[in-house]
Image (cartoon, rainbow, N blue to C red):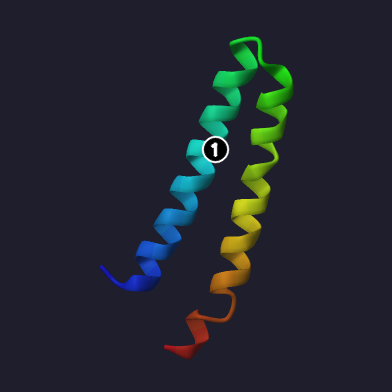
């Protein structure tokens, strides 16, 4: 597996785990914590987009 593919997989996995943790916190009654963790998802995905922007054209 290429380093770039592994990196993309880790970004998606991190965002997915953050989403699941957020939902779990929300439904367990810890709504403020769930919202806090929920705002990590777009941040992780934005970081991944920034990190891999323009990498496709350099190959």
Which residue is under mark 1? 18
Against 22, is 56 above or below? Answer: below
The quadrant of the image that shows the N terminus is bottom left
Against 50, is 12 above or below? Answer: above
Residue positioned most to the left: 1
Quick one: SS at disc 1?
A: helix
Determine which quarter of the picture holds residue 25. Answer: top right
Determine which quarter of the picture holds residue 39. Answer: top right
Residue shown at 65% from the left, 10% from the top: 29
Judge from the rendering whether residue 5 lies leftward or rightward of residue 48; answer left or right.
Answer: left
Label 1 packing within 10 angstroms: few (<14), some (14-19), many (20+)? many
Percent coordinates x, y for residue 12 in the rendering: 48, 51
Residue shown at 57% from the left, 81% from the top: 54
Percent coordinates x, y for residue 10 in the rendering: 42, 55
Judge from the rendering whether residue 11 lies leftward or rightward of residue 30; answer left or right.
Answer: left
Residue shown at 49% from the left, 55% from the top: 11
Percent coordinates x, y for residue 45 in the rendering: 60, 54
Against 33, is 54 above or below? Answer: below
Determine which quarter of the picture holds residue 6. Answer: bottom left
Residue positioned most to the top: 29
Residue shown at 48% from the left, 89% from the top: 58
Q: Report the front residue among 36 and 49.
A: 36
Percent coordinates x, y for residue 8 in the rendering: 44, 61
């Amino acid at each position: 597996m290429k380093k770039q593919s592994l990196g993309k997989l880790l970004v998606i996995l991190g965002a997915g785990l953050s989403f699941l943790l957020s939902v779990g916190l929300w439904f367990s009654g810890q709504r403020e914590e769930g919202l806090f963790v929920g705002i990590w998802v777009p941040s992780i995905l934005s970081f991944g987009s920034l990190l891999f922007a323009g990498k496709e054209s350099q190959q």
